[in-house]
Image (cartoon, helix red, strand yellow):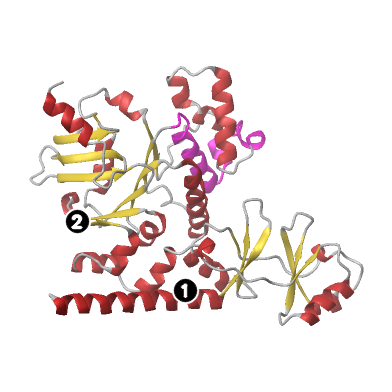
Amino acid sequence: MTDTEATDTQDAGTATDGGKIQIRLENLSKRFPGQRDPAVDDLSMDIPEGEIVIFVGPSGCGKTTTMKLINRIIEPTSGRIFLDGEDVTKTNPDLLRRRMGYVIQQIGLFPHVTIANNIATVPKMLGWKPQRISERIDELLEMVGMDPGDYRNRYPKELSGGQRQRVGVARAMSADPDVMLMDEPFGAIDPITRDRLQNEFLRLQEQIKKTIIFVTHDIDEAIKMGDRIAILREQSHIAQFDSPERILVNPADDFVADFIGRGASLKRLSLSRVRDVELHQWPTVPDGASRDEVRRVLDASNKSAVLVLDDQRRPLRWVNADHLHRTDDGRALSEIGLSPEAVVQPNATLSDTLNEMLSARYSTAIVVDSSHAYQGIVDIDTINETVRSLRRAERTRLEGDDLEDRDD
């Protein structure tokens, strides 16, 4: 290795702020045969370790091609790719791909083998021992919220779309890669399931801290999921590469502003999470409480219903005075009233929480921890105050920009 090559390799692994750069793209281009213009043109980008970086842009801009260049499913025409400071542009592409998990929109599970064998695909290729593979399968299924005893011997056709997507994520993580590539992974799923899978994946990312490159065409998904967003023009030219907050507050140009669209204040609710706001408390009673006790709790509060909790403080039912009057027949509280419709965890965005609340009878979202134990509630006043705070911050920023312009 020459001195110049050594310097390039070292520089490719270090960010200007001292943090580690996991992936560096250097003057990357791809020109397909017979095409006048390149699909990707001279793209350079640093992708920090442990972050979710979103590629988003109009259809045909080159975002999926760019992602496929990174693990060399598509070979670059020119430029270099660094992984952990190593130039991997000319290394064995199969070995490179084994260092990166890959999740696609169609999931791509093998239909004629079990869920366990789907997840075991890469570990078997790497020569892992059967016991280690079996333990890894169980670990990953539990991690994505699927009981190994129920799911490891099923086939993909026996699962829902959301369950297959979870298995796809588990398979991509099977060999514990440092990097994951995700090509519109939630794009083919109904909106409600997609929101919940997004939230589950964000919760999972808090534990695993992978470096993730995520392709989407949906700016709302990009704002929700990304630590950084690369908004791409045609040929993967970068219009803006920044945090979601800075893109919303200060779009680089008219192209970015048009791509973001209207309603930036509401979009910013995707930047705030339930864990960031102060929870309110709601009157609760244990499932074994008497009706007289429920009435006393109701009379002492300004609420129209109580929330019934089981012995592990998990929400069971909403019960109001009318329910008590109409069903005074000895049934347990968990057998009367209404099921709680809007239940969220602390990592849920306020945007998702608002969507849940709009369909809830009491205009509140119940917040539970990872064990589904009751923590508190988020109500419409919390959402309104957050929106007002965002607007105040925006006005302060604009006033500061005006002062700077006058000083210049």
Q: Residues within 10 Å of mark 1 (few under 14, many from 20)?
A: some
Q: Position of residue 48 (x, y in %)?
A: 31, 44
> 350 left or right of 310?
left
Instruction: Name the residue beneath numbered marker 2.
Output: 233
User: For the magenta stretch, what is the residue range?
Assistant: 148-176
Q: Residues within 10 Å of mark 2 (few under 14, many from 20)?
A: many
Front residue of this view, candidates 375 and 34? 375
Is 192 in the magenta? no
Q: Residue at x 54, y 39 (%)?
A: 157
Residue 295 sits in quarter: bottom right
Q: Identity of the amino acid at label 1?
A: Thr
Above-or-below relation of 290 to 142: below
Q: Where is residue 306 drawn, in percent x and y?
A: 75, 72
Q: Dot 2 lies on which element?
A: loop
Q: Secondary structure at mark 1?
A: helix
- Residue denoted by label 1: 386
Which quadrant of the rendered structure holds the N terminus? top left
Image label count = 2
Q: Nearer the viewer, residue 119 or 348?
A: 348
Q: Main secondary structure of the magenta part?
A: helix
Q: As shown in the figure, which amino acid type bears the numbered disc 2?
A: Arg
Measuring 66% from the left and 37% from the top, which residue is drawn there? 150
> Residues under labels 2 and 1: Cα distance?
32 Å
Q: Nearer the viewer, residue 240 or 335?
A: 240
Residue furthest to the left: 36
Instruction: Specify whether residue 236 is in view.
Output: yes
